[in-house]
Amino acid sequence: MNYWPYVIDERTKINLAKDESQKGSTEGDEEVSNLKTAEEKHWWKMKLNRENFLKKLKEKRDRERIRTKKSMEDMGYYFY
């Protein structure tokens, strides 16, 4: 069971059948580190894309609000 302070990372692979004398092999560690860096790259890429998307959406909404306000002022509605 995984409780809060003892969360086990899914990327770590525990091989209980492996003997202590075979610790020289680091193939699994490299695989985990490559997976970790790929996940981190993907995470940062998605985060930056989301921030840019939200910034563009906010700018678009502001432009639309200003455009609507101006067109309503042209029709005779005034905002004070």
Image: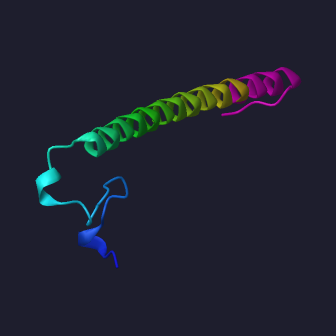
Which x, y percent locates residue 9? 32, 58
Residue 39 or 74: which is nearer the viewer?
A: 39
Q: Position of residue 43 (x, y in %)?
A: 44, 38
Q: Nearer the viewer, residue 63 or 42?
A: 42
Residue 31 in the image: state x and y as whole percent: 34, 40
| 50 or 37: nearer the viewer | 37
Q: Is residue 40 left or right of residue 56?
A: left
**Placement of 18 over or under 48, stated as above or below:** below
Towards the viewer: 79 or 70:
70
What count of labels does the image hold?
Answer: 0
Colour scheme: rainbow
Determine which quarter of the picture holds residue 62.
Answer: top right
68 lies left or right of 16: right
Quarter of image, res 6: bottom left
Quadrant of the snapshot with the C terminus: top right
Q: Residue at x 23, y 60 (%)?
A: 18
At 82% from the left edge and 22% from the top edge, which residue is drawn? 71
Which residue is at the far bottom? 1
- Residue at 31 percent across and 76 percent down: it is 3
Which residue corresponds to the image point at 31% horizontal and 55% vertical from the top-left? 12
Q: Is residue 66 magenta?
A: yes
Say which quadrant the N terminus sits in. Answer: bottom left
Q: Is residue 69 magenta?
A: yes
- Left or right: 2 in relation to 56: left
Task: Return the x and y of residue 77 as percentages of the image width and height.
Answer: 81, 31
Main SS type for the magenta part?
helix
The answer to whether 10 appears left or right of 22 in the picture is: right
> What range is drawn magenta here?
65-80
Given the current orientation, which residue lies at the most extreme right position? 75
